[in-house]
Amino acid sequence: MEAEIRPASFATELHAAPQGIASPQSWQSAGPLRVISVTSGKGGVGKSNVVVNLGLALAQRGLNVLLIDADLGLGNLDILLGLTPQFTLQDALASQLKLAEVIVDGPGGLKILPASSGIADLAILDEFQKLFLLNEMDHYTEDVDVVLIDTGAGISPNVLFFNIGAQERILVVNNQPPAIADAYALIKILASQYGETSFKLLVNGLAHHREAELVYRTLLRVAERFLSQEISLDYLGFVPYDPALPKAVMRQQPVLALYPQSPASKSFVMIAQNLWENKPQPGIDGNIKFFWRRLL
Ligand SMILES: Nc1ncnc2c1ncn2[C@@H]1O[C@H](COP(=O)(O)OP(=O)(O)OP(=O)(O)O)[C@@H](O)[C@H]1O
Ligand SMILES: [Mg+2]
């Protein structure tokens, strides 16, 4: 059967270049919790920076945002934000700490659940750890509007676990053939083995939106040609290559906080707006219990 690919459906679409910024009013949380994974097949394409800056853009509009560092073993959201947390997700799992004891405050009202780096033990979460985490999430997220999960890269069991648990998946990719091939591999495994067929594509680090558009169309074409499932691949937006971003990384601050007028920052604001305006279909229960029912 031929795959049916839904073309980009968002208003700003392929030309979501960094010109134009969202209007400054705050966004009321009018709906259920949204749990969104930020993922990639290949490493180093910009996931963690997307999580931090998209999270900040949403928080700047008055939303309560929780960032989860689920890159277990190589977590670095805390480093990107210049934080020195006392505990991490791994400590919570090892000592059954309440998430409220582990979650720290970040810039702009962000809440962050940090992960340790260099600990291989949790490369694969066991069933008890998954249950503990989901139960704690259930308690913690009562006042949260959006959860953004940095899944880490690849197709490991943990990456798949968080992608399956999330209601929405943002797939980050650049124009490097290995990154596109690995993005396709991740789509394929999530669709064919877990029935997860909807993705939002964020193209990062290119010079021009036309290159981003080409990446989107390439991925669409490949999925259309080779996947038997019906895939929904929406174009969420494009973040240009911007030297301000590595500068901000060096200073351990989000580029949106340090250089709000930079092209990357303006793109993050637009993408946040696009994301917020394009909520999932009604009927999807955003309660975190749903997140866990999906997983169990
Ligand atoms: N839009 C951009 N413009 C310029 N440089 C960028 C951009 N996005 C990312 N980078 C560079 O790429 C580096 C890696 O980004 P990041 O850590 O967010 O990727 P990642 O996908 O989380 O990596 P990993 O898979 O290793 O966790 C950044 O430190 C930055 O130097
Ligand atoms: Mg990362």
Image (cartoon, rainbow, N blue to C red):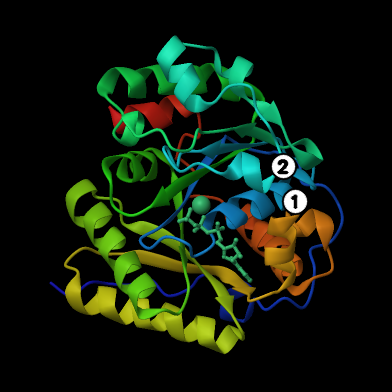
Are the residues flagged by discs 2 and 1 in contact, CB closer than 8 Å?
A: yes
* Location of the C terminus (image quadrant): top left
Viewer-closest of 171 and 231: 171
Q: Earlier in the sequence, mark 2 or mark 1?
A: 2
The part of the image, by quadrant, that contains residue 85 is: top right
Do we see residue 10 in this rendering?
Answer: no
Indicate the amino acid at tag 2.
Gly
Q: Is residue 238 above or below residue 285?
A: below
Label 2 residue SS: loop
The part of the image, by quadrant, that contains residue 21 is: bottom right
Image coords of residue 112 (percent x, y)? 63, 34
How far apart marks 2 and 1 lie (CA) works out to 7 Å
Image coords of residue 214 (percent x, y)? 45, 86
Q: How many marks?
A: 2
Q: Is residue 68 above or below residue 208?
A: above
Horizontally, is 256 left or right of 99 in the view?
right
Q: Image point 67% across, 65% down: which residue?
A: 246
List the residue tagged with mark 1.
253
Image coords of residue 88 (percent x, y)? 54, 26
Label 1 residue SS: loop
Q: Is residue 184 above or below residue 199?
A: below
Viewer-closest of 293 and 67: 67
The response on whether ligand 1 sits within 8 Å of label 1 is no
Labelled disc at residue 187: none
Labelled disc at residue 82: 2
Q: Image point 45% across, 25% down: which residue?
A: 90
Indicate the amino acid at tag 1.
Gln
Q: Residues within 10 Å of mark 2 (few under 14, many from 20)?
A: some
Q: Image point 74% across, 43% down: which residue?
A: 59
Do we see residue 274 in this rendering?
Answer: yes
* Location of the N terminus (image quadrant): bottom left
